[in-house]
Image (tube, grey):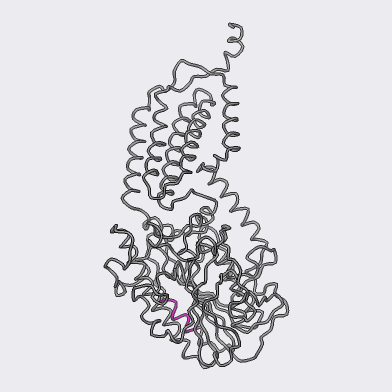
Amino acid sequence: MSNYKAIFKNYTLKIINWSYLLWWIFPILLAFCFELFSTNFQASRFLNLTENFFFAFFLIGVALCFPKKWRRFILHLNFLFFNLFTFVETLYFKWFGTNFSASSIFILFETNTAEASEFIKFYINSFSVSYAVIMVLYLVIYKIKHQKKKVITAHSVNRTQLIIGLILCLFFLRITKLIDQNYPYLVLRGSIEYFSEREKLKQIHIHLNEGHFTNVSLEEENPKTIVLVIGESSTRNNFELYNYPRKNNPKLSKRKEELYLFNDVISSSAYTIGALKTALTLNNFEHKNESSIIQLFNQAGFETHWISNQRPIGPYESIVTKISKASNFQTYTNSETAGQKTPLDEVLLPHLKTALKRKANNKFIVLHLLGTHLKYSDRYPDNFNIFKDTPPNFKFSENEAIKKRNEYDNAILYNDFIINQVISLLEKEKKESLMLYFSDHGDEVFHEKDFAGHNEDNTTASMHEIPFILWKNQLYQKNFKGVIDEQRPYSTQNLIHSLAQLAKIKFDEFESEKSIFSENFHAKDRFTTNGKNYDKIFKN
């Protein structure tokens, strides 16, 4: 036995003091308690609790594998990162009721600093601040207690055995899928998937003037103006036009006889990039030879304009920005940075007037609004701050919930003003003119759960159910040959076919059964980009 000890003497190291483990266990239990008493609590949080214990022991073991002079530093560094990981993971779950995921990384990388600033301001609440204070104080106390204090006892373990144990721990996490609960792993996996996807997108030339549409032509030579208005984060469940019990569409309601209100249209995704990369393209990025709506109109001989109040560039160029670059004229009105209030959507109207005055026979104009994007209170001027009382049929009594719903309804009220102004400008056109308005996706605003906003991994019906509104002048109405059925179930995933029929554009890739205006329209179950069957899970 003594010979055995002598052989492994040089490979032994000290074990952590067992009382020291309590410093790692406390943030795990604190986070679990916060989740346990959350309205979003799910049985899967027990898996997350288990994974957190394994992850803590793994980080301790990693520190003990280092040479003695580095061991203390690595141990304290791992402790700091572990607490930060636990804090962010728990806060994310409290906000969205789901784990951090790869789709969260996609949204993060496609978000600019101004949007990030608004996001933080929107979701910061008393719990977030209190939790942050607790964690900071805990780390300060830890530093004071363990700056010089030894956390190692005289007990020893074989270094080789420890490394083998760590490998087995990782293997166990992987085969049990507990690794899917691990926040750093999810961040790493999501980042790899994001950059891999971006490399694929570089091979798709949707920024060029023409796409891969074949035999493109116009059915007739009548000059026309098509305006596509893309809203942001607006659920139809908060529109007076769609029977919401608040008068937040006063101007459009006066025009109700002129409008076609489609009652069963959904977005395929609950975030902007995911929704618009399918709505504005032919193949939903499922084929290498992808082409966009802008390219289709270019090939059909339209003068194309992209007028946007969304910032064009985040840390990386977004897919939507790349699509917009194919247009003949591009105008971006929003250049605000973090901490600055973004411009109101009315800044787009002068640019729309300019585009309408141009002498081109056929014009296709895209207006990309900020709409009702959070932070809702920044989306409208003071004179639109109308709703201040408790909303009708409201399920939640918290002041913060009432405040956010009121702000959202005020943003819808201002959005009503903007859409009406667009129609007013189009009414002056002396040629065939129409406007199609839809929102990229909706928001959950305390309809089904105690939450405001949208999240791709934990969607509700309101995040998918969007307004889809058509207006056309009498000259266009006289020559329109399609079918208007406002009850048809539809997804904006097939928007390009509907818009082509409205514009009377023919091309080989057109599929009439995918156009909501076609007599050949064929309704199918609608799937979201995260694989959920909307018609079976969410409808009604």
Front-most of 443 and 70? 443
Is 350 covered by the magenta stretch?
yes
Residue at horizontal 49%, vertical 49%? 100
Q: Which residues are magenta?
A: 346-354
Q: Residue 372, how many percent across, how many down? A: 41, 68
Above or below, 305 relative to 127: below
Q: Residue 109, how many percent across, how many down? A: 52, 55
Q: Quadrant of residue 211?
A: bottom right
Above or below, 122 relative to 251: above
In the displayed orientation, state which residue is furthest to the left.
389
Query: Quarter holding the N terminus?
Result: top right
Above or below, 101 relative to 418: above
Q: Residue 194, how many percent across, how many down? A: 58, 53
Residue at horizontal 31%, vertical 50%? 126
Q: Classify residue 301 as left or right of residue 474.
A: right
Residue at horizontal 61%, vertical 11%? 7
Is 251 covered by the magenta stretch?
no
In the displayed orientation, state which residue is furthest to the top.
2
Secondary structure, magenta segment, majority class:
helix
What is the total number of numbered labels drawn onto the structure image? 0
Q: Classify residue 207 as left or right of residue 367.
A: right
